[in-house]
Image: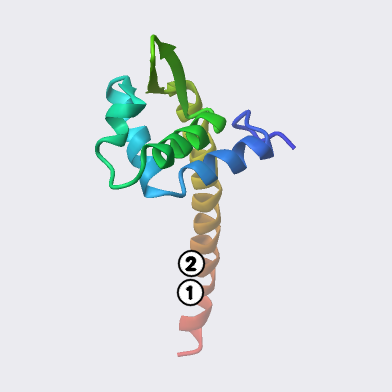
Amino acid sequence: MVTQSGLSETEIDRVFHALATATRRDILRRTITEEQSVSALAGDYEMSFAAVQKHVAVLEAAGLIIKRAEGRERLVRANPEMIARARALLARYEELWRARISRLDDLLASDAPNENKGV
């Protein structure tokens, strides 16, 4: 099934999985403003370089970051297109939620005058 955001169910699962960990969210945040090497990213975490590489791989598989080689270094930058698609999906969920709340408000408002008649 493809949602209105243009993401398949598999892509949605990958995005939410990638964003489920604070380290990956931090890597994404850091690479939005500037491209960074995996080595530079790894230097700021209390985990092995290999562990950071795995986090980067999850983000890359979700399409949230783009990794490229420059000589011996691997440079990482956020993928604004996929972030926008994920944001559109979340906006759609918000619209659905707000519509439900609005309907509930309307229902409660229509019941309120009936309750006052019995007083």
Q: Amino acid at mark 1?
A: Ala
Left or right: 37 as drawn, with respect to 94: left
Left or right: 81 as drawn, with respect to 27: right
Q: Residues within 10 Å of mark 2 (few under 14, many from 20)?
A: few
Q: Residue at x 52, y 52 (%)?
A: 97
Farthest residue in the top direction?
71
Observer-nearest of 95 and 58: 58
Q: CA distance from mark 1 to mark 2?
A: 5 Å
Note whether 106 is above or below 83 in the view shown: below
Observer-nearest of 88 and 45: 45
Note whether 109 is above or below 62 in the view shown: below
Helix, strand or loop at mark 1: helix
Disc marking residue 112: 1
User: Which quadrant of the figure has residue 3?
Assistant: top right
For the residues labelled 1 and 2, say whether their Cβ atoms are less than 8 Å apart.
yes
Give the image's coloring scheme: rainbow
Task: Residue 15: give x, y in percent of width and height.
Answer: 54, 39
Disc marking residue 34: none
Helix, strand or loop at mark 2: helix
Q: How many marks on residues?
A: 2
Q: Residue at x 33, y 26 (%)?
A: 32
Q: Residue at x 49, y 39 (%)?
A: 91
Observer-nearest of 33 and 27: 27
Note whether 49 is above or below 6 in the view shown: below
Task: Residue 77: give x, y in percent of width and height.
Answer: 38, 22
User: Which quadrant of the figure has residue 40?
Assistant: top left
The residue where tag 2 is placed is 109
